[in-house]
Image (spheres, helix red, strand yellow):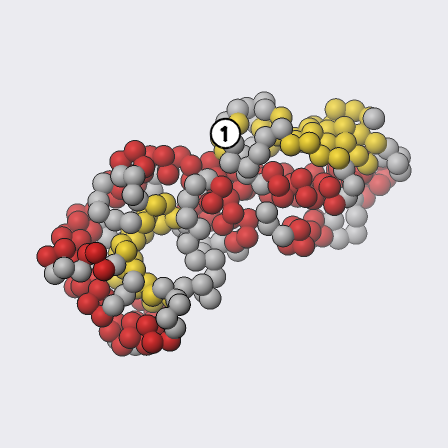
Amino acid sequence: MVGLNYLLRFLEEDSPFGDVTSEAVIPEGTKARAVIIAKQDGVIAGVEEAKALFEYFGAKVSARKHDGEEVKRGDVILELEGDARAILLVERTALNVMGRMSGIATEVRKLVERVKAVNPKVRVAGTRKSLLKPIDKRAIIIGGGEPHRFSLSDAMLIKDNHLALVPLEEAIRRAKSFSVYKVVEVEVESLEDALRAAKVGADVILLDNMSPGEIAETIDALKREGLRDRVKIEVSGGITPENIEEYAKLDVDVISLGYLTHSVKNFDVSLEVIGKM
């Protein structure tokens, strides 16, 4: 589960001076029952996070569905009992977290299943294109994908802007000598640079913005040189749900998509108050 303190920051942003509507309208001490329901089919995520938020404010929470489960429109996800003001205070923050995480998990699950049907060894990964990494990365995992790097501290990814300042071979040698514990990945856009990176000792080669044909040609060249088995191959850039199967057919290890987090469509969940206790 994402840390409670991280989640409470969202709530503080949403109610810096309390929920003035509930405080004005609902008598203090009113107890209520409520449910959170799915408004569409998909993979639910963020249940643990929502549960923790409501429980922090004293509500009794019963989970009817759990993170990673497939749900149908109308399914009850959580049942809530507690202070009415507290439930409504947490409502939107909890729904926002669940909606975003479920949207990501649903899309990841769909793509993972499509890719596995074509090539079981290929993994689907997200990227760092997100400012909400704790919840986004967990949602990717719940959906069955790879979270990729959580931060710049996790692994080395030498990109074009690094290579504009330091030659490829030198950059890889420096990265390899910096630490024996960090994976060294290099982003390339040509067959020639992929061969150079593999020969110098890169652990992972990211073939960026290359067509399926260009990727196949590059992998064939790595095989001819006896280099394919020395490296992991990741592909990224221009990959969409419409064309992902074309990339999955190739001899690659990972397909990464930034759109899983930067263009996610929220999953529709709703809180409905059933009545007073």
Residue found at the very far left of the displayed protein = 224
Percent x, y for residue 73?
A: 55, 24
Instruction: For residue 16, say whether it is visible.
Output: yes
Q: Is residue 213 left or right of residue 177?
A: left
Residue 82 sits in quarter = top right
Left or right: 139 as drawn, with respect to 2: left
Report the amino acid beneath label 1.
Glu
Residue assigned mark 1: 70
The location of residue 49, given as percent across then percent down, is: 63, 43
Count of marks placed on residues: 1
Q: Residue at x 54, y 42 (%)?
A: 100
The x, y position of residue 47, in whole percent, is 60, 38
Residue drawn at x 52%, y 47% as measured from the top left: 138
Q: Is residue 164 visible?
A: no
Give coordinates of residue 134: x percent, y percent. 55, 52
Q: Residue at x 57, y 27 (%)?
A: 39
The quarter of the picture where the C terminus appears is top right
Front-most of residues 195 and 212: 195
Mark 1 Cα within 10 Å, few/some/many (few <14, many 20+)? some
Q: Nearer the viewer, residue 178 or 79?
A: 178
